[in-house]
Image: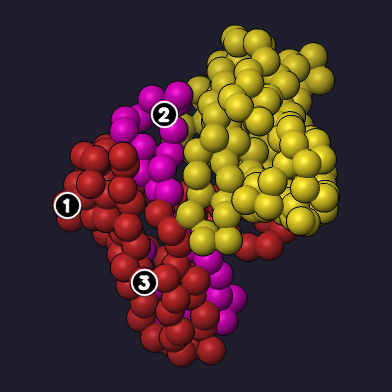
Amino acid sequence: AQKVTQAQTEISVVEKEDVTLDCVYETRDTTYYLFWYKQPPSGELVFLIRRNSFDEQNEISGRYSWNFQKSTSSFNFTITASQVVDSAVYFCALRGDNYGQNFVFGPGTRLSVLP
Amino acid sequence: DVKVTQSSRYLVKRTGEKVFLECVQDMDHENMFWYRQDPGLGLRLIYFSYDVKMKEKGDIPEGYSVSREKKERFSLILESASTNQTSMYLCASSPTTGVADTQYFGPGTRLTVL
């Protein structure tokens, strides 16, 4: 079975603080993909990043960075110098090559960045 | 840019009514998906379709049906709405059946069943 856990239900930070959102996954697939999506108050999920199971390089995109560690089955997301516009619900998702078309989503972490 | 649109942002229906949620994508994607989103549960897959007139059950298909008569349009049908179907419904599409494909989401329909 596949599963994604986001242990942090809600996080509040003050603007300009750094914040890390945790994601732990379970899968028996050899080949799989991990995703992060952002859901702002408008409701539409916005794709942020995709990472495949063979690529453990960390990735940085502006103030966003992702740390993928297969040894701990984690794919954590860090926002540096957070801004109010970062306030949203963030979802981590998993898709494995033996699991058909299904994405498995975590429950989401609600991030509130206070001015 | 990929555009996925949903017919309504907010919908209020009564128990027992038949409800249609419409989704349209403009990028000629093969796959389309319907999810429901509930607090603390994340997104759960209801149905998906990988081709016109083809459909597959997801994790929670009970009480729902779908229709895909045209490639760009995927409809979710609640045959007899119940209060436990009050939720946010999200439609998504992806280009192919490849496992690496990203899903692109619409803005969602918040359905309330009274």
Instruction: Label 3, secondary structure: give it.
Output: loop
Going by the numbered disc 1, the residue's amino acid type is: Lys
Q: Is residue B41 above or below residue A83?
A: below
Question: Hey, which residue is sitting farthest left in the picture?
Answer: B70
Q: CA distance from mark 1 to mark 2?
A: 21 Å
Residue drawn 63% across the image and 63% down it? B38
Label 2 marks a residue whose chain is: B
Mark 1 surroundings within 10 Å by alpha-carbon count, few (fewer than 14), some (14 through 19), many (20 or more)? few
What secondary structure is found at the residue carrying circle 1? strand
Chain part drawn in magenta: B76-105
Kindly report the distance in space between the C-alpha atoms of the residues bearing marks 2 and 3: 26 Å
Query: Residue B100: where, in percent of width, then height?
Result: 45, 24
Q: Which amino acid does the dot numbered 2 rest on?
A: Asp
Name the subunit of mark 3.
Answer: B
On screen, residue B26 versus residue B102, left or right, reads: left
Residue underneath mark 2? B101
Q: Colour of chain B?
A: red
Observer-nearest residue: A78 or B69?
Answer: A78
In this image, B92 relative to A82: left or right? left
Query: If you read the primary sequence from the N terminus, does the residue marked by circle 2 or circle 3 appear first?
Result: 3
Q: Quadrant of the N terminus of chain B?
A: top left
Mark 2 and mark 3 on one chain = yes
Q: Secondary structure at mark 2?
A: loop
* Relative depth, front residue between A110 and B77: A110
- Nearer to us of marks 3 and 1 is 3
Q: Nearer the viewer, mark 2 or mark 3?
A: 3
Instruction: Return the residue at label 1.
Output: B70
Q: Which chain is yellow?
A: A
Q: In the image, is residue A107 above or below residue B37?
A: above
Badge 3: residue crowd in 10 Å (few <14, some 14–19, many ≥20) = some
